[in-house]
Amino acid sequence: MHHIFQRHCHSELPIAVKGEGVYIYDQTGKSYLDASGGAAVSCLGHSHPVVRAALHQQIDQLAYAHTGFFNTEKAIELSEKLTHAAPGDLNHVYFLTGGSEAVESALKLARQYFVEKGELQRSQFISRKQSYHGNTLGALAVGGNELRRKPFAPLLMPTEHISACFAYHGKDASESAFDYGQRMANELETRLLEVGPETVIAFIAEPVVGATAGAVTAEEGYFKRIREICDQYGILLILDEVMCGMGRTGTLFAHEQEDIQADIVTIAKGLGAGYQPIGAMIASSEIHNTISQGSGFFQHGHTYMGHATAIAGALAVINAFEQEALLPRVQQAGEILQNRLSECFKNHPFVGDVRGRGLFRALEIVADRDSKKPFSACSKLDSQIKAKAMELGLICYPMSGTIDGKNGHHVLLAPPFIISDAQ
Ligand code: PLP
């Protein structure tokens, strides 16, 4: 008996005592291959020597200085690296402590941008049904996971949800992938015209959907059309790369592969690689300059934002990507993983799809492969898969998501970038 308030109140969890490379060890000495990096976090594996050294050094020097009083050299350096790599004029990084904070900050920044411009009537967001943006109230409101939203529904700000680009479930056999992508993107235009584009602040989406649908990539041209619509109707585009960003799909930012520019991007998870809690929001010069030349003050902040030790860890993580040439490796290892999974599960009666990009892959679990019918919402499938995998010494990330109002199941795999072909 212990006094930890566990999220799953009744699960008996092993005690983790050590991590090394792609493995976590429990107190009995049992090893677990961390094939999902927890929740797509540990992209460098465990106990990376360079990150450990950077953290030691920073704590010895200065663990924390409030960002209202000081900047640090490392924060400046990390902001330079991120903005240099980010497409377009995403030139201003706001450091936070995690993904939900980054999304909350992005939503508030987008609203404040229009307040500064005198467009006070803009008060709602549009997002997608198959999406997860975090568990705080603003992030939950724009997210699409009905199970997670339900108990808190009366507390959530009104948000319009459209379909995601999810070909496995939505594409008609008669239409091309491109046409399907355009049809899905045009849902944004239709909804904007229904609600009045002048009332909308931004559209928010994950470039590759993670937790709520399982490594779902958009069809080519989808995000270009989304960008076009946002520009045409004067709303902002927020891309949530908390899960799919930071090299997970083979490029530092996942939306580099969509050839578009965002107004705000959120990142977390792989940025700290699990060594420290850290997230960030990166804003365009247009947004930053509007606020800096307007009120000069962003009405939002958190005590631990821009934490000096977390920044030092994240800088070491980004440097390791470069020094160990890990992003090309993600693309190569991702292909191997996709091929092996497709081969292994090609005749499995309950695996309907194997998909993803880079080292961000998922199996969709269905009750029937032909009809793609999901298992029932109360099947407890995710906890059963998780328990069985852990028994076998594997950490993967089984989740339920929403498909056309029904619950669907998938298993996410997001292994560390250092994983070997054999592992
Ligand atoms: N956005 C996306 C796309 C996520 O996948 C997550 C977490 O899974 C979040 C936001 C929330 O991040 P956090 O759990 O760090 O608050």
Image (cartoon, rainbow, N blue to C red):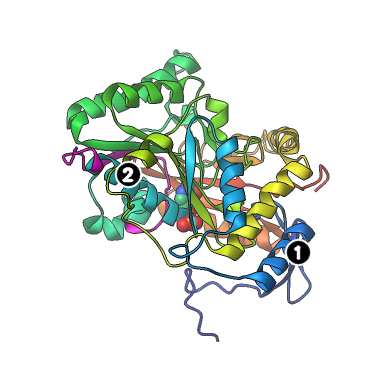
Q: Callout 2, which amino acid?
A: Ile
Residue 296 in the image: state x and y as whole percent: 32, 49
Question: Residue 385 versus residue 350: which sits nearer the camera?
Answer: 385
Looking at mark 2, is its residue's CB closer than 8 Å to ligand 1? no
Given the current orientation, which residue lies at the most extreme right position? 422
Left or right placement of residue 25 versus residue 113 in this view: right
Q: Does 36 appear above or below 120?
A: below
Q: Nearer the viewer, mark 2 or mark 1?
A: 2
Q: Looking at the image, how many numbered discs can be counted on the residues?
A: 2
Mark 1 falls on what kind of element?
helix
Q: Callout 1, which amino acid?
A: Ala
Can the viewer see residue 352 in this picture? no
Residue where numbered disc 1 is placed: 53
- Which disc is residue 249 wearing? none
Residue where numbered disc 2 is placed: 291
Q: Does 100 appear above or below 325?
A: below
Residue 97 in the image: state x and y as whole percent: 50, 60
Query: Does the magenta portion include 136?
Result: yes
Give how far apart the Cα atoms at labels 2 and 1 are: 38 Å
Mark 2 falls on what kind of element?
helix
Residue 77 in the image: state x and y as whole percent: 62, 49
Q: Does 129 appear above or below 418?
A: above
Residue 321 in the image: state x and y as whole percent: 71, 44
- Residue at 51%, 42% in the rendered image: 241
Q: Does 233 appear above or below 238?
A: above
Question: Residue 317 versus residue 25: which sits nearer the camera?
Answer: 317
Question: Residue 83 versus residue 327: which sits nearer the camera?
Answer: 83
Give the magenta part as a residue range.
116-137
